């Protein structure tokens, strides 16, 4: 490892990633040193949050650069212990550039209860997220997380991690961040609907029209 090498990624992208960390913390989608964020800055290079920092209080120079094989190539701090989770998405999905992992409390409640977010009630879930299944548990910070999510990565833009948290991805940092906000918002709404007796699903014609606006993972994001 050569962690002392200077960061080669543009300052603007580092500032954008730091802003996502602030946004996750401001909305209580992470607590303490939870969560991690990555963005592809070259075909074989990622910018990723460092291990052991509060992600709402990062400086752009705190970030690390790693190769797609996981080699730490630049930055003063070691990369996130969840780097493996990020590498799986970036290797399998050349259409995405950013990955956000957080522990949004209500969505993680769904994950802890083994309840997926079904895409048949809320238009923004159908268009911006698609179905959000629960991937089996893998101990955080171990290769088991990557193994658990691998079957879902090609076909989903948002995923719940059993007994752990959530992951969203996007073509940009903004899109991945927005999807995490949408996921938690949807979980809150669906929880309230369940408390009130259960959500009413959209009819088949409405579902078909909305799903047509979302042609593939990484597609439309405007509900
Ligand atoms: Zn986590």
Image (cartoon, rainbow, N blue to C red):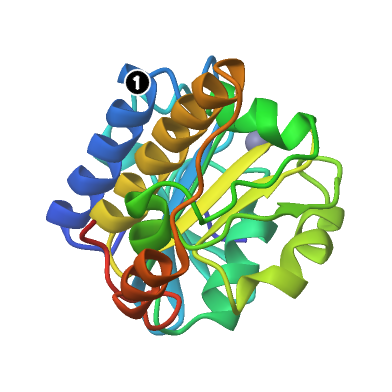
**Disc 1: residue Cβ within 8 A of ligand 1's nearest atom:** no
Residue 62 lies in quadrant: top left
Outermost residue, left direction? 12
Relative placement, left or right, of 58 versus 78 is: left
Q: Residue 49: image x %, image y %?
A: 46, 43
The residue positioned 41% from the left and 52% from the top of the image is: 125
Depth check: 15 or 2 in front? 15
The residue positioned 29% from the left and 75% from the top of the image is: 213
Q: Residue 169: image x %, image y %?
A: 44, 60
Residue 135 lies in quadrant: bottom right
Q: Residue 219: image x %, image y %?
A: 33, 76
Depth check: 70 or 212 in front? 212
Q: Residue 30: image x %, image y %?
A: 50, 24
What residue did someone put label 1 on?
Answer: 27
Q: Quadrant of ligand 1?
A: top right
Depth check: 209 or 147 in front? 209
The residue positioned 59% from the left and 81% from the top of the image is: 92
* Vertical position of residue 19 compared to residue 97: above or below: above
The residue positioned 54% from the left and 15% from the top of the image is: 32
Relative placement, left or right, of 184 versus 214 is: right
Depth check: 95 or 73 in front? 95
Q: Residues within 10 Å of mark 1 (few under 14, many from 20)?
A: few
Name the quarter where the N terminus is drawn.
bottom right
């Amino acid at each position: 490892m050569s962690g002392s090498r200077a960061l080669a990624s543009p300052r603007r992208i580092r500032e954008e990633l730091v802003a996502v960390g602030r946004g996750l913390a401001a909305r209580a989608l992470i607590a303490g040193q939870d969560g991690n964020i990555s963005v592809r800055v070259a075909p074989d290079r990622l910018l990723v949050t460092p291990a052991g920092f509060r992600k709402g209080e990062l400086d752009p120079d705190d970030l690390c650069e790693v190769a797609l094989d996981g080699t730490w190539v630049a930055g003063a701090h070691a990369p996130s212990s969840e780097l493996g989770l990020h590498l799986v998405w970036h290797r399998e999905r050349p259409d995405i550039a950013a990955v956000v992992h957080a522990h949004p409390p209500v969505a993680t409640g769904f994950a802890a209860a083994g309840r997926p977010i079904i895409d048949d009630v809320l238009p923004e879930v159908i268009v911006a997220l698609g179905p959000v299944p629960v991937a089996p548990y893998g101990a955080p910070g171990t290769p088991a997380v990557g193994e658990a999510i691998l079957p879902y990565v090609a076909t989903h833009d948002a995923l719940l991690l059993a007994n752990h948290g959530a992951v969203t991805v996007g073509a940009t940092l903004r899109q991945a961040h927005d999807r995490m906000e949408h996921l938690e918002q949807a979980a809150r709404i669906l929880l309230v609907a369940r408390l009130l007796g259960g959500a009413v699903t959209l009819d088949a014609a409405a579902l078909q029209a909305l799903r047509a606006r979302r042609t593939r993972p990484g597609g439309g994001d405007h509900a």
